[in-house]
């Protein structure tokens, strides 16, 4: 009887240890979801980098007074990338949300939730940039340098807000990656 009680105690303690560590449960499914979501998010970030490579020289040049760097073609190319990002991000967000329905994967849920915040920040930044470009496009199409200068003066606060959204996005992403690192989440 003592051996049976000792064996039951060892099994119960072993199961409790597994639950604390986060093993078992839906770990493999969480890993699969997160692997796919992270890959899709990384691909979307390549588009974001392309967007930055288009907009940074144009907007920086224009803010410095060189309005000739603003082109309709460049703004259209940027808009196409933004639209693709806005179309892709909801699906990526849903991939991270799937982890919340799983059991026994609290560390993975914590990371997934942090990445949902990242995707939300990314979406907000893209929407803000799109709104800005939508208002800038007609002015650039007019070719009126004075109107472009006036537009930049009138919208300087919006540009600053977009920079703040970018900072929030970077902060959210860094926090998510810290959670991933601290919890040794590998997949």
Image: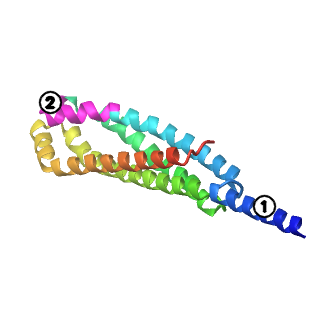
Taking the image as shown, residue 9 lies to the left or right of residue 85, namely right
Residue drawn 33% across and 32% down?
Answer: 54
Residue drawn 25% across and 49% down?
Answer: 135
Residue drawn 78% across and 61% down?
Answer: 10
How many other residues sit within 10 Å of disc 2, few (<14), some (14-19) or many (≥20)? some
Residue 92 versus residue 102 in the image, above or below = above
Q: Position of residue 7 (x, y in %)?
A: 84, 62
Q: CA distance from mark 2 to mark 1?
A: 74 Å
Snapshot quadrant of residue 6: bottom right
Q: Residue furthest front?
A: 2
Taking the image as shown, residue 109 lies to the left or right of residue 158, namely right
The magenta region covers 53-68
The colour style of the image is rainbow
Residue placed under numbered mark 2 in the picture = 66
Question: Does the stretch in magenta take in 64?
Answer: yes
Specify the principal SS of the magenta part: helix
Residue placed under numbered mark 1 in the picture = 10
Quarter occupied by the N terminus = bottom right
Assign a secondary structure to mark 2. loop
How many other residues sit within 10 Å of disc 1, few (<14), some (14-19) or many (≥20)? few
In front of the other: 174 or 89: 174
Question: Does the stretch in magenta take in 167?
Answer: no
Q: Position of residue 183 (x, y in %)?
A: 54, 49
Residue 138 versus residue 103 in the image, above or below = above
Taking the image as shown, residue 9 lies to the left or right of residue 35, namely right
Looking at the rendered structure, the number of numbered marks drawn on it comes to: 2
In front of the other: 158 or 168: 168
Labelled pair 2, 1 in contact (Cβ < 8 Å): no
């Amino acid at each position: 009887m003592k051996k049976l009680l000792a064996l039951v105690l060892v099994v119960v303690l072993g199961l409790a240890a597994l639950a604390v560590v986060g093993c078992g449960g839906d770990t493999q499914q969480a890993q699969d979801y997160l692997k796919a979501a992270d890959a899709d998010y990384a691909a979307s970030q390549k588009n974001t980098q392309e967007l930055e490579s288009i907009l940074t020289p144009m907007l920086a040049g224009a803010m410095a007074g060189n309005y000739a760097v603003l082109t309709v073609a460049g703004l259209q190319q940027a808009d196409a990338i933004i639209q693709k990002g806005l179309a892709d991000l909801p699906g990526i967000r849903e991939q991270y949300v799937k982890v919340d329905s799983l059991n026994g994967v609290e560390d993975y849920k914590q990371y997934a939730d942090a990445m949902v915040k990242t995707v939300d920040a990314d979406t907000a930044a893209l929407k803000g940039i799109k709104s800005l470009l939508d208002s800038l496009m007609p002015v650039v199409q007019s070719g009126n340098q004075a109107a472009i200068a006036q537009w930049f003066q009138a919208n300087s606060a919006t540009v600053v807000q977009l920079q703040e959204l970018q900072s929030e996005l970077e902060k959210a992403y860094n926090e998510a990656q810290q959670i991933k690192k601290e919890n040794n989440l590998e997949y």
